[in-house]
């Protein structure tokens, strides 16, 4: 039987936390799909209410203004999940083109929550939706009030565990008592090799520098969008010389984004800067998990790496650095959902 939250009987969720570093932007209008198709790296029709496509927005030079996830809420209504600091600047950028398509852009009056399985099942029951069970799969409440998106956790011997992102109307979220650890979700993202760029990182990286094509965030089969020519050329000519890497610091305090990573080879007296931190989160045992964009050539010599004097130990990402077509991901999800 479906239960519903109410002010008199709040639903207590011990493993759910607000994701205050993320927010949502609503794009609505009769040609919202056409508008987004010309602006974003996603094949927009893949965001069909069952598959929430990873995507990014670029400058004409192919540098990312934002990366995010695109969910379809209803016909002519899309909701874009991005870093909270990017809602206003991205909206200001896109509004320059919106009048040509008669679409509106608004910060969503919504709350984003991250939940583990037990709480996700409770939330799914509370809001009367089917819990999605594979990565980037989306489900929606019958009254369109809430959506859930399944996210991959860290990989364990090739087997993914899952976590769920819920987007709820702010009024409904106020009826919940969320007592989870707010640091859990950002740490899981870092360990998964998934970075959400913030406002200070705009116009800094090609999508491939944060492995976006390896996560299915770039469609190489769609038509033109802003920056498409540069992004495609970098892919097909193999011109990407910087890549996102995962490592751990023996330090409990995460370094600031933009902090340099230095490399020292045998015989070198001074370390050379080969990249910078793009995301980090406190991990277990006093360590910090770090995602850094690094020049790939110096890494071939297996140098000693450090961040502000503390050793950085690289480890394998939970995915291969190779192109993953979102069209194939969507097809796989559709097959899994119908099985």
Image: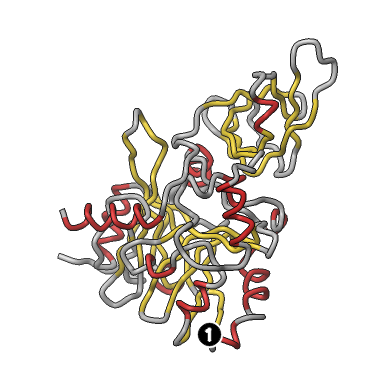
Q: Quadrant of the N terminus?
A: bottom left
Image-quadrant location for residue 65: bottom right
Q: Does residue 115 sit above or below 169 in this rendering?
A: above
Q: Nearer the viewer, residue 167 or 64?
A: 64
Q: Please report the residue visible at 63 percent of the width from the left and 42 percent of the height from the top.
A: 240
Residue with the mark numbered 1: 103
From the viewer's perspective, tell me whether residue 173 is left or right of residue 301. left
Residue 7: percent from the left, percent from the top?
A: 36, 71
Residue 111: percent from the left, percent from the top?
A: 47, 66
Q: Can you see residue 18? A: yes
Image-quadrant location for residue 282: top right
Q: Residue furthest right?
A: 269
Q: Can you see residue 85? A: no
From the viewer's perspective, tell me whether residue 308 is left or right of residue 290. right
Residue 30: percent from the left, percent from the top?
A: 44, 87
Q: Nearer the viewer, residue 23 or 35?
A: 35
Q: Please report the residue visible at 53 percent of the width from the left and 26 percent of the height from the top.
A: 315
Q: How many marks?
A: 1
């Amino acid at each position: 039987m479906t239960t519903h939250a109410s002010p008199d009987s709040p639903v207590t969720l011990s493993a759910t936390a607000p994701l205050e570093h993320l927010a949502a932007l609503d794009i609505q209008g009769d040609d919202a799909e056409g508008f987004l198709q010309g602006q974003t790296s996603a094949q927009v029709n893949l965001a069909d209410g069952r598959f929430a496509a990873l995507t990014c927005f670029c400058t004409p030079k192919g540098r990312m203004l934002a990366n995010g996830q695109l969910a379809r809420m209803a016909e002519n209504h899309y909701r874009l999940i991005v870093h909270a600091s990017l809602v206003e600047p991205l909206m200001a950028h896109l509004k320059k083109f919106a009048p040509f398509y008669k679409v509106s852009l608004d910060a969503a009056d919504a709350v984003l929550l991250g939940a583990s399985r037990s709480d996700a099942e409770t939330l799914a029951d509370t809001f009367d939706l089917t819990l999605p069970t594979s990565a980037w799969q989306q489900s929606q409440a019958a009254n369109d009030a809430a959506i859930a998106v399944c996210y991959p956790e860290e990989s364990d011997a090739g087997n993914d565990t899952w976590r769920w992102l819920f987007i709820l109307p702010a009024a409904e979220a106020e009826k919940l008592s969320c007592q989870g650890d707010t640091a859990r979700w950002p740490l899981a993202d870092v360990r998964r090799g998934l970075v959400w760029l913030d406002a200070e990182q705009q116009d800094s990286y090609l999508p491939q520098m944060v492995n976006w094509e390896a996560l299915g965030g770039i469609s190489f089969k769609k038509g033109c969008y802003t920056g498409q020519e540069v992004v495609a050329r970098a892919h097909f000519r193999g011109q990407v010389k910087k890549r996102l890497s995962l490592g751990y610091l023996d330090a409990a305090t995460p370094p600031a984004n933009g902090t340099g990573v230095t490399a020292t080879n045998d015989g070198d007296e001074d370390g050379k800067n080969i990249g910078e931190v793009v995301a980090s989160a406190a991990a277990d045992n006093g360590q910090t998990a770090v995602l850094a964009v690094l020049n790939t050539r110096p890494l071939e010599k297996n140098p000693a790496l450090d961040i502000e004097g503390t050793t950085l130990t690289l480890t394998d990402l939970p995915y291969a650095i190779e192109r993953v077509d979102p069209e194939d991901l969507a097809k796989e999800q559709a097959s899994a959902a119908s099985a």
